[in-house]
Image (cartoon, rainbow, N blue to C red):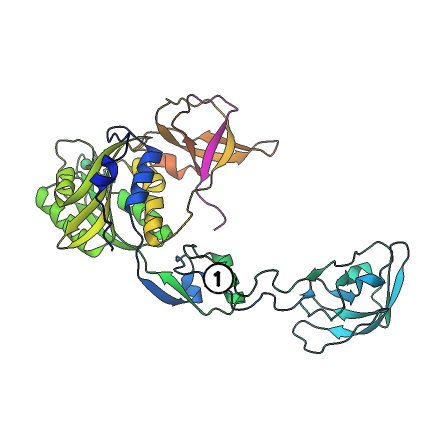
Amino acid sequence: MTQPNRTLHDLTRNLATFDPEALPVDRAQAIINAFVTPVQAIEQVALRSALDRILARDIVSPISVPSHDNSAMDGYALRGSDLRADQAVTLEVVGTAFAGGTDRVTVLSGQCLRIMTGAVMPTDCDTVIPQEFTDVGDKRITIAAGIVRPGDNRRFAGEDLQAGSVALAAGTIIRPADLGLLASLGVAEVPVRRRLRVAFFSTGNELRSIGEVLDPGCVYDSNRYTLFGMLSRLGCDLIDMGVVKDDEASLEAAMRMACESADAIITSGGVSVGAADYTRQIMARLGDVGFWKIGMRPGRPMAFGQVTSNGKSAYLFGLPGNPVAVMVTFYFIARAALLRMMGATDTPLPMLQASSQAPIRKKPGRTEYQRGIVSRNDAGRMQVRITGAQGSGILRSMTEANCMVVLHDAQGNVNAGDMVDVVLFDGLE
Ligand code: AMP
Ligand code: MG
């Protein structure tokens, strides 16, 4: 990974109002995005393998799509100038054009050509009457007055894409529609950024892995599973380093190994000021790391920076330990930065508005992320209610939710019926 030419310390020192003890969410996001840099390596992959990858270069269209003017309907191609506003016209049928057909028929005034969807428009014809609007004659058809206007139902050459224009811009996350678009250009291989390698581990002496006995006072490690899910959805290569004990030697060894093998490291736990946590000390010793208290709930304490071991460096996201806080800080702080590191551009989460079904208590001065369920009310409008208990350790509030309700920094209490911003967990893709 390329080294940024400035340290996190330099970056934050020059900010007029930087306070690591009370950092607004948008400030934290901006600092992180300014600090991280995209991976540079490019791979050439087969079209299908490009799904969900990040396009590394602009794709310039080698051809116009479609390459000819063609019919948008099954019907009859005709000259618009033959149509009459006030009377029916009868036209002689001079042949048939199929999609992919190569015969070029000349259509004179008073004539028409039976034409299928996608077939090339005959020269001089500019209009197609859909067959359901005619009497579908073999030899001639009659078209009632006013039923079609000149120019209707014709697709122009290049209306989808013009040869030489940028069909897809570098930084695009390739979705199913993009695969189709690239296929329509005849593109067989696509330049994409190499995948981002992300190492992650959980810290805490109380954590047990699945399969181990749950000793008294212990909990199963769930963060590595939510992180696995969220990182997989982003399309990262994952290095799961397991649970790391809260002792100096284990933490240092894990952090160094992560640093030497990954572009980014995500840890959970140990970033608040608990006495038994060595995590902060090791992070501070191995790099240029800020320990922030972000003005958000859940998810206040967080570490961010760059760590180095044996000449290799990696960006570090030290997320809090609480299971909901991990997910919220991942989605609203780490996600955009990881996408930027992956080479993606333009990745804001789409926010919708819904009316709150009940009052919500909210203190101005921090951003709150509540777990919600959006539905439609009787009038067909979006409404949202908060899922049960919202404690930052209560993962069930996440599994029951289908959205996050985002209550912004300056916002205060919400009344029933007020509109609030929501981010849906799942969209169409
Ligand atoms: P910490 O930030 O390390 O003080 O942890 C805060 C809380 O989150 C504690 O109750 C931890 O037991 C819990 N916690 C930390 N890591 C995990 C994890 N990987 N899975 C489940 N709970 C965790
Ligand atoms: Mg801990």
Which residue sits at x=43%, y=60%?
A: 51
* Residue farthest toward the left in the current orientation of the protein: 249
Q: Nearer the viewer, residue 3 or 360?
A: 3
- Figure quarter occupied by ligand 1: top left
Observer able to see residue 255: yes
Above/below status of 255 relative to 378: below
Q: Secondary structure at mark 1?
A: helix
Image x and y of residue 220, in percent:
24, 41
The secondary structure making up most of the magenta span is loop
| Picture quadrant of residue 6 | top left
**Magenta stretch containing residue 421, yes or no?**
yes
Instruction: Name the residue tied to disc 1.
Output: 179
- Count of numbered marks: 1
- In the rendered image, the quadrant that contains the N terminus is bottom left
Q: Amino acid at mark 1?
A: Leu
Residue that lies at the very extreme toward the bottom in this rendered image: 103
Report the magenta residues as a range: 412-429
Pick out the residue farthest to the right.
Answer: 87
Which percent across, then down, holds residue 106? 78, 75
